[in-house]
Amino acid sequence: MSKDPSDAIRRASATRPRGARHFRVGLRDVISQGIPREIFLDLYHYSMMVSWPRLFATIVAFFLVFDVLFGCLFHLAPDCIANLNPPGFLGDFFFSVETLATVGYGDMHPQTVYGHTVAMIEIFTGLLMLALITGLMFARFSRPRARFLFSRLAIVRPIDKKTTLMFRAANERQNVIQDASAQLRMLVNDVTPEGYELRRIVDLPLVRSQHPVFALGWNIMHVIDDASPLKHENAQTLDARKAVFILSLTGTDETTGQVLIARAEYPASAIRWNSAFLDILASTDGTLYIDYSKFHDVEPLAEAPSPRGPAMTSPATSTTIGGRAK
């Protein structure tokens, strides 16, 4: 049996009930049903979420539908348009295109009350379409987009003689993000004493959750001590509980004044135990050099006694992060 995730997604899509929706929430594929998809009741949200090619295709489709509709109305009265060229419905269609776009070349023009009335309605429709499309394009282009770089992996290593879970983040624009803040949470499968299964959200406090001037990089750390929810966890237990770490960053872009929001998700398999990030900083004659090509690279640390008791070994053996082997 194939273990390719894309094969599983295709099989799930092929067998999903009629009307079900397939989407992704972080790292998880979800198929939902029972909620009708009312696109026209939520058109703005749909227009903001749809891809650019599909958006342009939708706009072109609406444009052509209105052109054909008003072309048919003009065609109902053959003499309502003067100097119709080419004759027949094709001429009515092209006149409808010019009217909807408010171009008006001057050769063809309405010559009856009926023609003027239909043209007036179409011009009003064209102005509304132009206003809506302009607003939509501005909203999509002006939407705040954070360009935060998150390390693909997280590490567990001793810092200040304390076992620490560490993530790395950077600002790709390399301008100043004021009052940046970070939050780290863990999602795990859990069972209550009553036997109720749930997906629990656990807050993980950070050594420093705010950065006054986030411009280059930020090491985001959670100390695994006796007060940490991770004190009795290891690689095997986190994997068994389908643990996912969610790191969220927010801040105000000093250039635009916009609030930027971004997040990254790390499954248990993305945690590298007893490892360290490669150093990306170098200083020569007072100039700081940063090599972001090594931003995602990690290297194993030499086996050393854990600052919290028993040895912190690799996941291949009996990895511990809280001084207690499982």
Image (tube, rainbow, N blue to C red):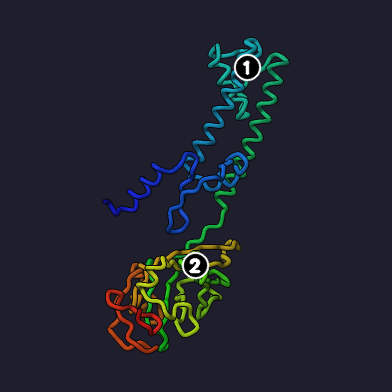
Q: Is residue 206 above or below residue 119?
A: below
State the quadrant of the C terminus: bottom left
| 285 relative position to 138: left or right | left
Q: Is residue 8 above or below residue 318?
A: above
Q: Which residue is mark 1?
A: 74
| 105 relative position to 225: left or right | right
Q: Secondary structure at mark 2?
A: loop
| 9 relative position to 91: left or right | left
Mark 2 → mark 1, Cα distance in angstroms: 70 Å
Q: Is residue 175 in sight in this rendering?
A: no
Give the image location of residue 25, x and y in percent.
Answer: 47, 56
Could you tell me which residue is drawn at 45 percent across and 68 percent down?
245
Residue type of the residue flagged with mark 2: Gly
Give the image location of residue 141, x and y in percent.
Answer: 55, 50
Q: Secondary structure at mark 1?
A: helix
Residue neighbourhood size for the residue with mark 1, other residues' Cα within 10 Å, grouped as few (<14), some (14–19), many (≥20): many
Could you tell me which residue is drawn at 30 percent across and 53 percent down?
4
